[in-house]
Amino acid sequence: MNDIRLNVRLILLFVIIFILGKFVLRPYVLANDYPEFVNIFVLSLPNLCEAVAGVLMLTNLSLMINYHWLKNKIGLTYIYLLVTLFAALYVILQEMKIHNIGSVNIYDPYDVVYSVIGLILSLVYLLVKKPGYNPNFIIHNS
């Protein structure tokens, strides 16, 4: 069973992509004349990154809670499905402007599509890699 270190690395990768996309790539693309599909991709990429990073972060927290407090009573597949469902509810409700927890959004259907793509990619990753929790992942004895 894989530990959650890879999830932490992926979270950091998607945070870096988010920052570069939002604060470097987006202003550059908007200042120049690019085809519409490039604009859509660049403007919606942060939504995909938020969805992936959010699912992986919630997964890591859920795996730790399951191990420490619930003594592994919840199966990994259920954790992955519940976390993705919870993240999907949060993301979609935010995109539909039902809540503004975390940011103030302007509704864009492409943002919803990219968020859903990120959620699906995250779930597929979790179901394929099946990351688990290793309580010694932070402390390495040499």
Image: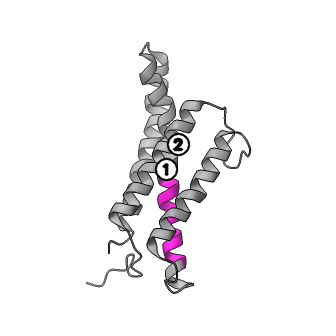
Residue 133 in the image, given as x and y percentages of width and height: 42, 76
Quarter containing the C terminus: bottom left
Q: Nearer the viewer, residue 95 or 50?
A: 95
State left or right for residue 110 relative to residue 36: right
Q: Which residue is drawn at the image coordinates 58% and 52% (left, top)? A: 88
Q: How many marks?
A: 2
Q: Nearer the viewer, residue 23 or 112?
A: 112
44 up-or-down from 1: above or below: above
The prevailing secondary structure element of the residues shown in magenta is: helix
The range drawn in magenta is 53-65
Q: Nearer the viewer, residue 35 or 82?
A: 82
Q: Is residue 71 visible?
A: yes
Distance (Cα) linking label 2 and label 1: 6 Å
Residue 29 in the image, given as x and y percentages of width and height: 44, 22
Q: Which residue is drawn at the image coordinates 39% and 62% (left, top)? A: 127
Residue 16 in the image, given as x and y percentages of width and height: 42, 46
Circle 2 residues within 10 Å: few <14, some 14–19, many ≥20: many
Quarter containing the N terminus: bottom left
142 up-or-down from 110: above or below: below
Find residue 115 and name its label: 2
The answer to whether mark 2 and mark 1 are in CB contact below 8 A is yes
Q: Based on the picture, tell me whether residue 32 belongs to the magenta stretch.
A: no
Q: Amino acid at mark 2?
A: Ser
State left or right for residue 25 relative to residue 142: right
Q: Amino acid at mark 1?
A: Leu
Q: Is residue 11 visible?
A: no
Q: Which residue is drawn at the image coordinates 64% and 52% (left, top)? A: 90
Residue that numbered label 1 is attached to: 119
Residue 134 in the image, given as x and y percentages of width and height: 39, 79
